[in-house]
Image: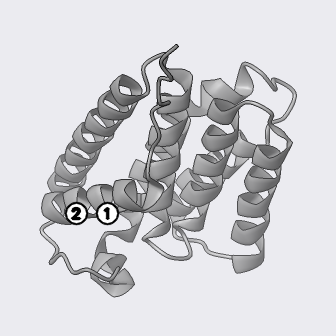
Amino acid sequence: MRHVKKERIKPVLLLYTVRKSVSEILNKPFTERIDHQAFKPDQKLLALWAAECAEHVLNYFEDKYPSDGRPRKAIEECRKWAATGVFKMAKIRRFSLDAHDAAKTAKEEDAKYAAHAAGQAVATAHVPTHSLGASVYGIRAAAAHSSIISNGLVEEFNWQLERLRQIKLTMSKLV
């Protein structure tokens, strides 16, 4: 009997790929090390994108844990910050940690990664590169949910990049 090797996602490689693509879309220089300051001018744009990345996979968590609203609240707080610019670190930290705690209680990988995506999204208010974490966790959630991991990964990655382009275009028209 032949052993079939299970597909695995390499998070570090995925983060590298996401970061490179985001840098290209935002016309930022790409370096081997993450430059948090390079993304600072686009922090609100990245927060909106992170919220969309997290919300796109949130149903993987909510379908299994409908009474646990912590990840959704984190996404809502992320959007609220992007709209108002009002920042209270204790509040951002609480929403982020609550979403990550929800992930720890989830048994299924897709639900776990979806909740982590929400925790990373709201943390974008603190550091813009947390948006990359929301993206990576969103991709991992979609891949875990898909019967063919690589299909879920590619589809979610492509959807996320298209959303980033659309948000960038919309925001550039507002300026």
- How are the colours assigned in the image? one colour
Q: Which mark is residue 77?
A: none
User: Residue 4, image x and y in percent?
Assistant: 47, 23
Q: For mark 1, what is the residue?
A: 16
User: Residue 119, image x and y in percent?
Assistant: 65, 55
Task: Tell me if mark 1 has few (under 14), some (14-19) or many (20+) residues whose alpha carbon lies within 10 angstroms of its own.
Answer: some
Q: Amino acid at mark 1?
A: Tyr
* Residue sitting nearer the eye, 77 or 128: 128
Residue at disc 1, secondary structure: helix
Residue at disc 2, secondary structure: helix
- Left/right placement of residue 95 relative to residue 31 reads right
- Contact between marks 2 and 1 (CB within 8 A): the answer is yes
* Residue 162, picture quadrant: top left
At horizontal 22% and vertical 63% (from top left) the residue drawn is: 20
Placement of the C terminus among the 4 image quadrants: bottom left
Image position of 71 with respect to 172: above or below: above
At horizontal 59% and vertical 66% (from top left) the residue drawn is: 123
- Left/right placement of residue 171 relative to residue 151 reads left
Image position of 102 with respect to 36: above or below: above
At horizontal 86% and vertical 42% (from top left) the residue drawn is: 105
Q: Amino acid at mark 2?
A: Lys
Task: Tell me if mark 2 has few (under 14), some (14-19) or many (20+) residues whose alpha carbon lies within 10 angstroms of its own.
Answer: some
Count the marks: how many?
2
- Left/right placement of residue 75 relative to residue 148 reads right
